[in-house]
Image: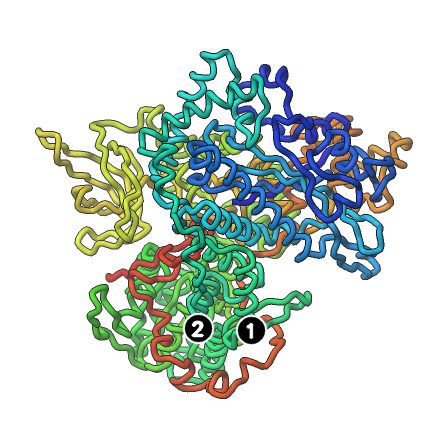
Amino acid sequence: MLSITVKKGQTAKGLAGVADYPDENRNKEKQVGAVEDYYSQGSEATPSRWLGGAAAELGLSGAVNREDLLATLQGFDPRTGEALVQKAGVDRRYAFDLTFSAPKSVSIAWAVGTEDVKRGIEAAQDRAVERTLTFIEEKFALARRGSSKEGTITKEHVKLLAAVYCHGSSRELDPQIHSHAMLQNMGLRADGTWGALNEKELFEWKLALGAVYRAELSLEISKNLGFGIEADREYFRLAGIPKELEEEFSKRRVQIEKALSEKGLSGAKASEVAALNTRKGKEVVEAEILSEEWTKIAGEYGITAESLQGLRSMERESKHDSFSLDHPELFRKLTTMEAVFQEKDLVRIAGGAYSQNGRGLDAVKTEVAACLKDPEIVKLRGKDGAIYYTTQKMLVLEKEIQAMARAGKEDARHVVSPEATKAGIARYEFEKGFRLSDEQHNAINHLTTRAGRIQILEGHAGAGKSTALVPVRYALESQGFEVVGCSLQGKKAAGLQKDTGIRSQTIASLLRELQGFEREDGGKVPPTKTLTEKTVVVVDEAAMNDTRLMAGLIRETEKAGVRLILVGDESQVPPVAAGNPFKTLKKELGCAELTENRRQRSDWQKDASREIRSGQVKEGLQKYLEANMISIAQDREEAIKKTVKAWCDRFVTSDPTKTLLTAYKRSDVSELNARARETMQEKGLLSGPRVETTVRDREGNSEGKREFQAGERLYFKKNNRKLGVMNGDTGTLAHIDVTSNGKDCMFTVRMDNGKEICFDPRDYEQIDYGYAVTIHKSQGETVDFSSNLVTGMGLNALYVQLTRHRDGTQIVLTEDQIDKMAQNSGVELEPTDKMIDFTEQLLAKQPKLAPLLPEDWNKKFDVLREFLDKHSGVELGGRKERDGQNEFDPRLEKVKALLASIRKNEKMNPLDFEVVDEKEKKEGKLEKWIGKEVLEKPEDRSMGAPSPEKEPGNGKEEGIRPAEREYELERGGMEM
């Protein structure tokens, strides 16, 4: 694992905090687990060394000396004190902390193993870190020269300088081999001059660099120490070390702290002193105590120094030397989540695979070079000149969608007369007792009276897309057409059916019925459904459909002469899997549009939603800030508390179906669920017998045990026709009946759709707490109030979170998250208007401060923020009124500046790029656009109808990062 953080400061104290390793006296004052700086005073207690091509140029080698480090952090030559970079001093970005953490099983082997195992693992860690830093130095042009205003920016390769420190335990007091590589914010150019680094590429390549490090570490450990290597999701682990032992260490911190306190020692100190090499003295005593505890815990699971020897192979050469990646499988993995990719993505997946087979960086480089020469790869160039890649298959699918859309433009078989459309509208208005708007009239006419086999309706959040579909159904049915509906998720399909009366199912189940599919036992299920040219298929939330799914759907409906009506919103969350076909089709065919926000009741919220959607983020967020609906927490724990509290305050006083608790990642949702349930217990809202039962995911994999009581909110993960539930349904556990023997029970659940169901939780195990949901699953929902935890997002996610409610919302971020979002955004933040106005007022009152600002101060957020922090009297994180001015909070200003700079999280399509080479024009590849032989292999034509066990997005595909699984959508087939 690799993490990257920016180390910066403004004062000598801040500089010392980065450079100094906490001394013994400071440790005694700190509580266990307090956040501590990791960097050394140069003692032998913490192994350290200088790395990088620039080290020798500055006469630096061996252990890191504190005075040398203080000089280089400020941008000075440690020998002469000469400034090497512009704006050298204490007020700058000092360095980038690249933290390389070994897999837990490696750390356990180091903690328990013999002396030669310990030293061997230490050497492997050192080698892996050094090779990764060399790769960075060779690969990236991290220095820039010139002026962005004049368009003269050039990138240059530079020699780097890194101070590397090694540690053997985490702050949680468990064994954790990790190295901090303090990459100094300066590089040596070829002409002998120095320049500050641009970290953009480092952050963009972070996952790939982590894979490079793991591959090299795996090679060193398997080849030189003989340990077996096995896959652990996208990581590797040492074969033979129980997973349960890895989990156990996180539970034993209290036990270890007790052992230390009995010796009169500090737990905070102990969490750092178990370094790879320690001097004799008090640190050794502490390290020995930790080692004793670690050995005791490992022994309970059969892992000892002796048993580790048995896990080491007598054959030191890797048995995986012949391993190589299957290119078709690799390319499938690369295009599972994105239709286009870059070299870093290829390095990430190849590096991950090679790390699981004991092969290192050299093998990864060879594999990547071979992949880029494969005729299946198509080289692309973006508008910014950056190089991307796609595969022949993805390009074919994209062009097939485009070709089928063009071919059906003049198809008039489904055109409804203006009179029939007018009658459908009149019927709806009579039934509801109100008149539809002119905008809705125009959209309905667009969908019914125009020629074209594919029609598109784009509706802004809360614009009433479902309302417009009812008159469309009336008009089509009056002319003898059958209208059927589908959507990506079962719950959305059920909502479409409920709101419009259109019989609906999931897209996956529809395609399986049309195409048939292969069962797990290898048997084939034939098609069970046919469509005709008198059928119209309405696809709800169509902008969430990926290229493969949309291609399969369009292909099947084209074959039957069916009209497709695609309903969605490109500005909301994009497809989870590869591609953005809604964008392609909208560009090719145009669309009807509904823009009026009918969901939110306050005019200012409607205005804010419109502004955020159109990119006027500063203006839109300002309205929510003034309404106190955006808050900043100091840390993650406080953020979760704030988010749950805001939700609970409304939940306990209103209909539970009218409140919403959301987060972006599944892991965040799990934490919110746990905290929400604790709150429900504290408030006495859960009652009756407590029943603990195993819960499982949709594929039947155990997700542990959960305790349930009456009053719980439940989330259903799998379609079940007998129960009448679908993936994504929610309800309230009304009652639990437990038999007299206490072994059997029945759950009675009051579903949010009004039905009541009963089931034995052992028979239907695909349930979980349903207090919180992901943003993806909240799209399309309407509630009175929503509370939202923000842990990473783009404008699309923000737009969804700010448009689920009728009355109010709460958005919660952390200070750390704001900084991370800024680092990862890759953009230069500009100050907000409020910051500029505040500064101008300050300078008018204190002209002597003007020389402290650079000429372009009104263009640089960080420069201006630091200036205001120092001189305005407004403390960071504090909200104060000053001289009669409005409240000013730099953190909130950064939120506005940051989000205004982040682009929408759009999925990219191959057709958005220029093709660089001609490989895709080879005979038989891209010449066949119209007809049924577009793809080379018949099985590719079923890509739109994945079998249940191989559906994209269900997390089954190897090579998908957990970060991607976090946001996945489940596509269970639904029959209604």
Identify residue type, mark 2: Leu
Would you say residue 538 is visible in this rendering? yes
- Mark 1 closeness class: few <14, some 14–19, many ≥20 residues within 10 Å: few
Closer to the camera: disc 1 or disc 2?
Answer: 1
Residue 634 image offset from top left, x and y in percent: 57, 30
User: Label 2's element?
Assistant: helix
Residue 45 image offset from top left, x and y in percent: 61, 26
Name above or below for residue 583 compared with residue 597. Answer: below
Which dot marks residue 454? none
Name above or below for residue 428 compared with residue 295. Answer: below
User: Label 1's element?
Assistant: helix
Residue denoted by label 1: 373
* Residue drawn at point x = 29 percent, y = 80 percent: 532
Residue 757 image offset from top left, x and y in percent: 19, 45
Would you say residue 805 is visible in this rendering? no
**Is the image coloured rainbow, by chain, by secondary structure, or in one colour?**
rainbow
Front-most of residues 206 and 261: 261
* Residue drawn at point x = 55 percent, y = 46 percent: 605
| Residue 472 shown left or right of residue 396 in the figure | left
Name above or below for residue 814 compared with residue 702. Answer: above
Q: For residue 796, what is the image quadrant?
A: bottom right
Image quadrant holding the C terminus, namely bottom left
Which dot marks residue 447? 2
* Residue drawn at point x = 41 percent, y = 31 percent: 250
Which callout, 1 or 2, points at the residue further toward the start of the chain? 1
* Residue drawn at point x = 38 percent, y = 55 percent: 955
- How many numbered dots are placed on residues in this image? 2
| Residue 310 shown left or right of residue 885 in the figure | left
Identify residue type, mark 1: Lys
**Disc 1 versus disc 2: distance between alpha carbons?**
46 Å
Front-most of residues 663 and 951: 951
